[in-house]
Image (cartoon, grey):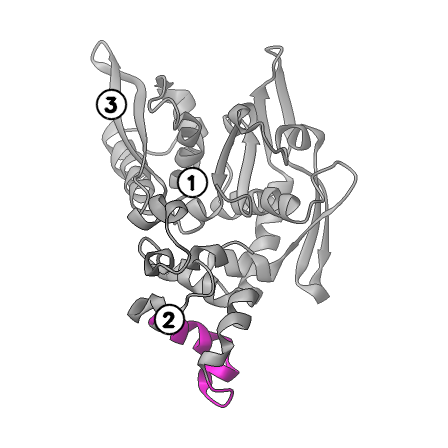
Amino acid sequence: MSKGNLVVKTNQLNSALQNLSLPEIRIVQLAIVDARETNTGLSTDKPLRIDALRYAEMFETTRQNGYKRMKEAEETLFNRRFSYIDDDGKVIKSRWIQQVKYLDDEGAIELVFTLAVVNGISRINGAEDFFTSYLLEQTASMDSIYSVRLYELLVQWKAAKQTPMFELEKFRDQLGVEASEYKAMCDFKKRVLQVAIDEINEKSDIKISYEQVKKGRSIAGFKFKVLVKDKPKDAKQEGNRDINTADMFTIEGLNDKQLGRIARNPSFMADYNHLVSSTSPAGQNVKAWESEIIDRLKKDPSDFTKRPIRGYLVY
């Protein structure tokens, strides 16, 4: 698993009762990822910078809109509270953010998390067995907040391949469903649960299904099966193939968003800028470059053989 966009959170914090919006969760995700990538870590006294351009690239929007979304998310996140049970069985209540600074002229924000969050989110190496970890890319394209929250709850059970029962009321809280929302079970399953399952199965690295657990005639909760999807054939065999084998450079399993990220990688651009004329649209405009490269990758990825294509995903 690539460390580049790895999000790592303690299971206690990950299972905390909370009701974050999708933009708020994305702020937290980016903070975790960028703390790792910049080797700054998270602390209660050192601000962490998040740039609008970074947000825009990861979540496919404009820099201006990215900054607007970041500010709106921060304003609500600043007032959010959450709770979880610590190792001693005690209830911990906390806010998410203790300080924020707007850098309007730079299109960025600086924020400082609270002690509970810093203690619950770690830039660790070698101890992932005790943590919930996943690649940011697995949730970046999800449109439903319920999909992201369900993924975060279930991904920690990949090794076990199944979960214990999630008690209904607590499960609703963990998904961020208000007590007044989707009170009828048919509405909850149709508009929350199935929406999340379908999106996770389509866009992430796991495939999930559920069974409902009944107490008498009422549904008491849900259990899930969590299976890791098969890797593309080329990814399984890369380690055993010669670097000059065309299969090392296949784009099988990569979507347009991932191909666009590859095309924008400065190392990729340096390796292949000779493929376009400096006077052509692709030689003068980043969007045109990205569009042309995506088309070329789809048409014949064997033209790009300086190193395995997936190697450009992380930067």
Q: Residue 148 carries which label?
A: 1
Whether residue 243 is visible to the viewer of this picture, yes or no, is yes
For image coordinates 62% across by 54% down, the residue present is 71
Residue 35 position within the rendered picture, expressed as x and y whole percent measured from the top left:
65, 44
The type of residue carrying mark 1 is Val
Q: Find numbered disc 1 in the image and state the secondary structure of the residue it sits on.
A: helix
Q: Mark 2 and 3 residues: CB-CB less than 8 Å, in contact?
A: no
The type of residue carrying mark 2 is Asp
- Residue denoted by label 3: 211
Q: Which of marks 2 and 3 is nearer the N terminus?
A: 3
Towards the viewer: 187 or 161:
161
Residue 121 position within the rendered picture, expressed as x and y whole percent measured from the top left:
62, 33
Q: Which of marks 3 and 1 is nearer the N terminus?
A: 1
The type of residue carrying mark 3 is Glu
The region drawn magenta spans 277-295
Q: Which mark is residue 10?
A: none
Q: Does the magenta stretch include residue 285?
A: yes
- Residue denoted by label 2: 303
Answer above or below: position of 274 versus 26: below
Q: Mark 3 and 1 residues: CB-CB less than 8 Å, in contact?
A: no
Q: Which of marks 2 and 1 is nearer the N terminus?
A: 1
Q: Find numbered disc 3 in the image and state the secondary structure of the residue it sits on.
A: strand
Q: In which quarter of the image is the C terminus?
A: bottom right
Counting labels gives 3
Towards the viewer: 221 or 285:
285
**How far apart are the alpha carbons under marks 3 and 1?**
20 Å
